[in-house]
Image: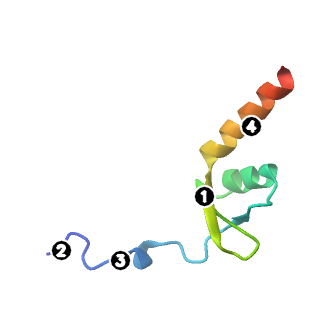
Amino acid sequence: MNKNNGKVVGDLMTPSPLIVRETTNLEDAARLLLETKYRRLPVVDIDGKLVGIITRGNVVRAALQIKRSIES
């Protein structure tokens, strides 16, 4: 029997995922990542085209960089 039992990505994906836009404030994206089950969010442009993904790690690193720049 096939290891994936005939399943395809579409069977497992999250339909209509929560997204953020390129222009979304970093604080708002961080809040979404912390207050939901998601560890990463698709980032779309003004036309709704996927342009990237932001992760909890991206947000933490950015926050640390901002904190360091303020302290120096």
Gap between marks 1 and 2 measured at Cα: 31 Å
Looking at marks 2 and 3 on the same chain, the residue that comes earlier in the sequence is marked by 2
The quarter holding residue 36 reads: bottom right
Mark 2 closeness class: few <14, some 14–19, many ≥20 residues within 10 Å: few
Mark 4 vs mark 2: give the one in front.
4
Gap between marks 4 and 2 measured at Cα: 45 Å
Residue plotted at (73% across, 77% down):
47
Please determine whether, in this image, residue 48 is positioned above or below residue 60.
below
> Where residue 19 sits: x, y (%)?
68, 67
| Residue under numbered circle 2 | 2
Amino acid found under the numbered disc labelled 4: Ala
Looking at marks 1 and 4 on the same chain, the residue that comes earlier in the sequence is marked by 1
Amino acid found under the numbered disc labelled 2: Asn
Relative to the observer, which residue lies in front, 15 or 36?
Answer: 15
Amino acid found under the numbered disc labelled 1: Ile
| Residue under numbered circle 4 | 63
Relative to the observer, which residue lies in front, 47 or 68?
Answer: 47
Callout 3: helix, strand or loop? Answer: loop
Looking at marks 4 and 3 on the same chain, the residue that comes earlier in the sequence is marked by 3
Please determine whether, in this image, residue 49 is positioned above or below residue 26.
below
